[in-house]
Image (cartoon, coloured by chain):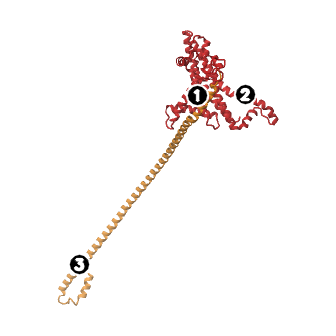
Chain colours: A orange, B red
Amino acid sequence: MNINLTLIGQSITFALFVWFCMKYIWPPVMGALEARRKEIADGLAAAERGQHEQELAEKRAVEHIKDAKGQASDIITQAQKRASEIVEEAKGDAKTEADRIVTGANAEIEQETNRAREQLRQEVVTLAIAGAEKVLKREVDKDAHASTLNDLATQL
Amino acid sequence: MAGEALTASGYIKHHLQNLTYGKFPESHEQAGSWGFAHTAQEAKEMGFMAIHVDTMFFSILLGALFLFIFRKAAKSATEGVPGGLQNFVEWIIEFIDNSVRGSFTGKNPIVAPMALTLFVWILLMNLMDLVPVDWLPQVAGIVGSTVLGMDPHHVFFRVVPTTDPNATFGMSLAIFALTIFYGIKIKGIGGFMAELTMQPFEAKSIPMKVLLLPINFFLEFVGLISKPISLSLRLFGNLYAGEMIFILIALLFSSGIGLGIFAGVLQWAWAVFHILIVMLQAFIFMTLAVVYMEMAHHSH
């Protein structure tokens, strides 16, 4: 229980231990703790950011799908419209063509009729002339009564 | 234990005597020379010029052990996943850091490492109390008699440094010096003296101040001085009492088989309870040291 030099020795020992602890133990451990705390905080922040970004991406994806759907239905509508237009056009064309053909045919028929009629007329004229020639062979000069005969032929 | 006169009081006295190395007094036959004290009387006569070899040995050994382990962990400390040792060290350091933050508001890089050193060091020294009281002194007796050629009865050996008031006072006086140093550094010499003389009784007029000065100074000075004394005596008293009870229990071992078994149970029970005291005293010493530092940094 004697108080002696041990007192001073202990004080010095204590001071040295505190100095060593302050210099070589406390800073690196606290540094590591602080760095880890920061790393964890950063990681959490990054995770939150990632989640937020994912949510945004999902929203964007939904919008994209909606847009695509709209565009697709637009395209389909346009295509249907175009198809019916094409059909209508084709119908119109066909009708015009048919009309043209019919008209052409009618014209041709008329032409043929006219030609046949003309031919018939000529033949009738020729026949009539032939008949008349035969009748009038003697008294009517073919050249002198040609105009009269032609008049007659047109009236037929 | 060893020796011819094995009485209960002799046993206890032997266990409470430090291994003292010092300068023999004038009255001694080896006056002026240095050596180990052979008896408690000799150790006492050596006065201040002596050193407790066992206290110094164990305190330095345990302190070095603490610093070695913590330095090892600190050197390889990474911010990644910590290993077992680093985890343990970080756990203690965070615990100390939290309690220091709780009671110390100033900015001083010395306080937290000081608290860590105090806590772990005192804890380790206190834990030496749990080693059965005769083991290490017996080993020391054998070593002393075979290596140094001493009478084993004269090899005193106390393994718990904190049961030596020199150790506890050494720490508390160092803390006391720190508190005074920072008190003067922060508040200035005037502020420090004002704190000693202008309270607790405050006065407006100068004559009243002068009148109250002696009373204030007396009260504050007693308060100032009582801090290191109570700090060290609390730790010393608790550990000394604990060690004394271990010694008394150990006495029962030599009193027959029934009492021996009873003593074994008692020793176990007291050791379990003592773990609590050991931790608590280390924590209280650390916390109070931090509180005293806080008081030095802020005027109250």
Near mark 3 (Cα within 10 A), the count class, few <14, some 14-19 or many ≥20, is: few
Between label 3 and label 2, give the one nearer the viewer.
Answer: 2
Element under disc 3 = helix
Q: Is residue A102 above or below residue B268?
A: below
Three-letter code for the amino acid on which mark 1 is drawn: Trp
Three-letter code for the amino acid on which mark 3 is drawn: Gln
Front one among B226 and B278:
B226
Counting from the top left corner in percent of width and height, residue B56 is at 59, 25
Q: Indicate the quadrant containing the C terminus of chain A: top left, top right, bottom left or bottom right.
A: bottom left
- Residue under numbered circle 2: B222
Which dot marks residue A119? Answer: 3
Element under disc 2 = helix
Q: Is residue A33 above or below residue A9?
A: below
Front one among B259 and B171:
B171
- Residue under numbered circle 1: B121
Q: Which chain letter matches label 2?
A: B
**Mark 1–mark 3 contact, CB under 8 Å?**
no
Residue at 79% across / 32% down in the picture? Answer: B212
